[in-house]
Amino acid sequence: MTNTRERIRRELAADPRVVQAVVDAVHDRVPAYADLDDERLGEVRAIAGWALERLLHLWADDGTVGPDELRRFRGIAAARAADGRPLAAVLRAYRVAAAVLVDEVAARAPAVEDAFALTRHVLATLDALSEAMATAYAATSEHLAGDRARALRLLLDDLIAGRHASGGAAADRAARLGVQLPYPYGLLVAEPDDRDTVPQEAARDLLAAVAGDDATPLVTAHGCRAVLLLPAAAARTAAPVLCERGWRGCAIQGEGLDRIAVAHRLADGALDAAPPHARRFLTDADAHVLALLGGHPATAPDRIARLVLGPLSEPAHRHLLAALTAYLDTGSAAAAARCLHLHPQSLRYRLRRVRELTGLDARDPWERLMLDIARTVGARG
C-alpha cells in the first residue's frame, strides 16, 4: 500500500458524488438502465458503492479479486438473469463505472503510475468477473427456462413493470423461452365482480377462454386482476367472454412493444377510475379519456380525438361531426336538426352513421361524455 493511493481511496470513499457520477453515467449511457425506477436505481447505487470500494481497496493494497467478491458478482448476475436484464448490458454498465473511477483517480493522482496501476486492476477485475457472471447468468437462465410457466409469468411481470429498456430486449428474452411476443398485441386487464385476489389459475383459465388453448401463455395475476398479453384480434373479441363470466376489463392495443408498461398503467387506471355507468369492456379510447380526466400525462388531447372520433375527423365526414356537435350542444335530435336546417330524420340518420363509425352511442351517458370530450379537445387542437 502506498500513502498516496490510500489517501485517494479515502477521499473517493468519503465523496458521495463519485458513486452518484457512476450511477448517472450508467443511467445515461446504457439503454437497459435508462428506464429503471427509483427502487432499482437505488439497487444500482448500492452495488456501485460496494464495487467501487472493493476495487479501490484492491488498488491501494495491490491485491487481486478474491472468491468472496466473485461469489457476490455471481449472485448479481443470477438476479439480472431473473429480472431479464441482458448480460451484455450489465457488463457494459461495469465498464462505464470503471471508466468513471479511472477518471476520478487520474484527476487526483500526482504520479502517472498510480493511474496506470488502477487501469491494470480494472482490466484484470473486469476479466475475472465477466467470466464468473457469464457462468452464473447462463445457469440461472437455464433454470428459469426449465420452469417455463414461471419464467413466462416473470416475463410478463417484468414487461408490465417496465423492466425492459426496449422491445428488442423483451423479444430476445421471449425467444430464449421459445415464444414470440404477439404483434400487434392487446394487453387485457380484467377483474371479476367479486374482487377477491385472482389466483394464477383463474388468470390462465381466462386466457384459455379468450384466446384458446393454443395461445402463448403470457398471463399473470396482479392483485385482484388478471393481466393477459394477447394478439390484438383476440383482445378485440374478449368482451363477450368477460361478460359471460361476470368480469369487466380494459384492452389496450395502441402501444408498441416497448410501451407495454404504459399500456398496463392505462388499463389499470381505467378500471380504477371508470364510473359505474361506464361500459364493462373498456378500450384505448375509454382509457385515454379517463387518463385525461384524471390529469395523467400518459395521454394527449389530439390522440384522444383520433381514438374516440376515428373517421369523423376526416374531411369526408365533417357533416357527421357537425351533426354530432349540434346534438351534443342542444341535447336532442329535433333541436340539432333545426340548428343545422335539416329534417329530423336526416339528423337521426347521421347520428346512426356516427354510431357505426365510432362504435359509440351519443344516447348512452358514458359514451356521450367520451364523444363530447373528444370533439371539444379535437376542436382546440
Image: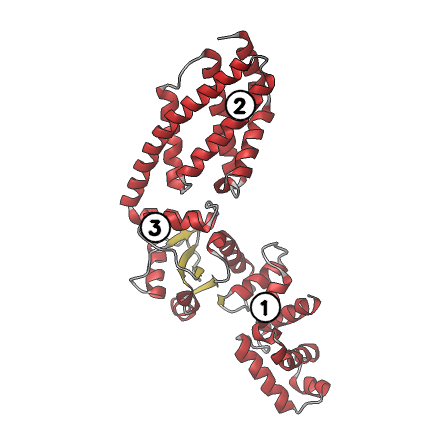
Residue 156: tell me if it is visible.
no
The amino acid on which the numbered mark 2 sits, given as a three-letter code, is Val
For the residue pair 145 and 124, the one nearer the viewer reads as: 124
**Residue 217 numbered tag:** none
The amino acid on which the numbered mark 1 sits, given as a three-letter code, is Arg
Residue under label 3, please give it. Answer: 175
Determine the residue positioned at 57% across, 22% down: 104
Name the secondary structure under disc 3.
helix
Residue under label 1, please give it. Answer: 306
Q: Quadrant of the C terminus?
A: bottom right
Name the secondary structure under disc 2.
helix
Image position, residue 39 (x, y; %): 51, 38
Q: CA distance from mark 3 to mark 2?
A: 38 Å
Label 3 or label 2, whichever lies nearer to me, is 2
Badge 3 or badge 2: first in the primary sequence: 2
**Residue 102 numbered tag:** 2
Q: CA distance from mark 1 to mark 2?
A: 52 Å
Position of residue 104 relative to residue 368, above or below, is above
Image position, residue 86 (x, y; %): 41, 41
Image-based side of 356 in relation to 228, left or right:
right
Badge 1 or badge 2: first in the primary sequence: 2
Determine the residue positioned at 51% across, 69% down: 279
Q: CA distance from mark 3 to mark 1?
A: 34 Å
